Amino acid sequence: MDFVDPVELTEQDVVDALARIAAQDAGLARSADHAYEALTWGEGPGALRQAGLQFWLWYAVPTKYITDEAGYMSRLAAGAAALFDELGLHAYSAICRSSVTAEVHAAYDRSDAEGQRATGRAIEKSGIDPPDLADFAWSDFMGGDESSARSAVEDALERAVAVGDLVVGGRGWRVAQAAVAESALDGDHPDLPGQSWRTAVLTERLKHWVGAAQRHGRRLGSARAAVANRLLHPVEPPSGAFAAVAPLVSFLDRHGDEQPLTQAGYLTPSFVRSLQDERRLKLVPPLSRETRTEGDDRALLALRKWLQLAGALRKRKSKLMRTSAGTAMAADPAEAWNALTRHLAPRGWEGFVAEAALLHLLDTAHRDAEASYDSVLAFVVAVAEDMGWTTIDDGERRVPSEIDAAWALFDSRQLWEACNLVTPQRSWHDQPLALTESGEAAALSFLRHTAAGPRTSLE
């Protein structure tokens, strides 16, 4: 069956189609006319899209119409199907009459929860729902550019299905779907010369990241703006990347598939001693000969906690298990570097402190200036106050202090020193502090994952 592009249709084609339907069934024509208006919003037949039809049929019709009319969903679907038949959009009419649509409507008749699950299955089965790619994920909350980019990918997938380039459910169809999506995402933007849909989305996300800080305070907004252009493109791993992740790889390799934990939840003393004896972990500061338990060594404990945060280790009852991600990191330093840069800082208050610290260190390095640990803490406290962070002390709410910031940064600082991302310090105060070459690359990569990654909230 030939593919008919709705863009090729005219308003007169629609008028004539509705007239032919009305000549046979006036009620059906009214339903067809309503469907057309609901799907195009006055923008003409060129606005008709499979994704829009599916949204209307499988979500808007069951949930947005306030009516007690029995069978109204089937009536509207039938009207839309009749119009699409007259316009030669037979793929669209088939969706309206499909068992999938009938199942979605029946599910909503039973409950909204069942309907939502049925809608999800139907969208997945259609094959035109843009998939996440290896280096790109769609946001839960999209700006205008990302929404338009998603529509462009939906349209490319629709065309690929229609002409037979993508056979949904066929062998290797997921790989083919991803290839179509990637090609569309990297295609030329129609209104921005020299840009693709992907670069437009990344630029929009970075603007939002900067703007979210600027709305609350000048300092963090300025720090983010200063680094934003460096985050537009992927950051290549530095020459010292594999050396930086050596402590992670060594720990995971030595850990093996599992290790028992003590009743207190620590690694056993014998395992801790074996790490010391073999000197396989290049920790800064190094493991002390007097260290007997994991709890005695904050550097080792911070490293293990980070590996759990990154999904490399998982606690299961009285054992610490190495996950498939951990096994991949142990086998491939490139995987370990990717994990390190994605999880360079935790979430919440500790994550905010770590991000602010990294931004300050990047800014001072870019200006050929010098930072100290104390200046980092002072910057963190200043931007925390700008952004409205507070803590409670003896029942009184107050802004965080430098001591609060230092505690929040402690585990991240241990990790950064262990992986040689910051210059090692004998003292943590009033001493020059800087990112190493690997540290700068890791910081930029982490900030890119954060700033140019998918938005999961409105903020």
Image (spheres, rainbow, N blue to C red):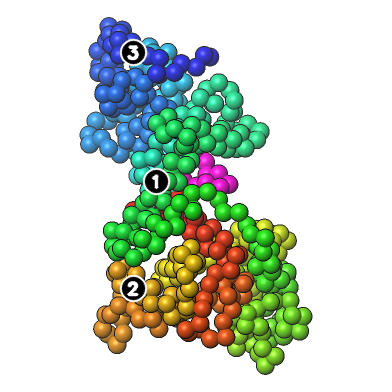
The numbered dot on residue 204 is 1
Q: Left or right of 49: which side holds 234?
A: right
Q: Which SS class for mark 1?
A: helix
* Residue type indicated by callout 1: Glu
The numbered dot on residue 382 is 2
Q: Which SS class for mark 3?
A: loop
Q: Position of residue 302 (x, y in %)?
A: 57, 77
Q: Nearer the viewer, mark 1 or mark 3?
A: 1
The numbered dot on residue 86 is none
Q: Residue under circle 3?
A: 10
Q: Left or right of 149: which side holds 28?
A: left
Q: CA distance from mark 2 to mark 3?
A: 60 Å
Res 350 → quadrant: bottom left
Q: Nearer the viewer, residue 41 or 368?
A: 368
Mark 2 or 1 closer to N-term? 1
Q: Left or right of 222: which side holds 22?
A: left
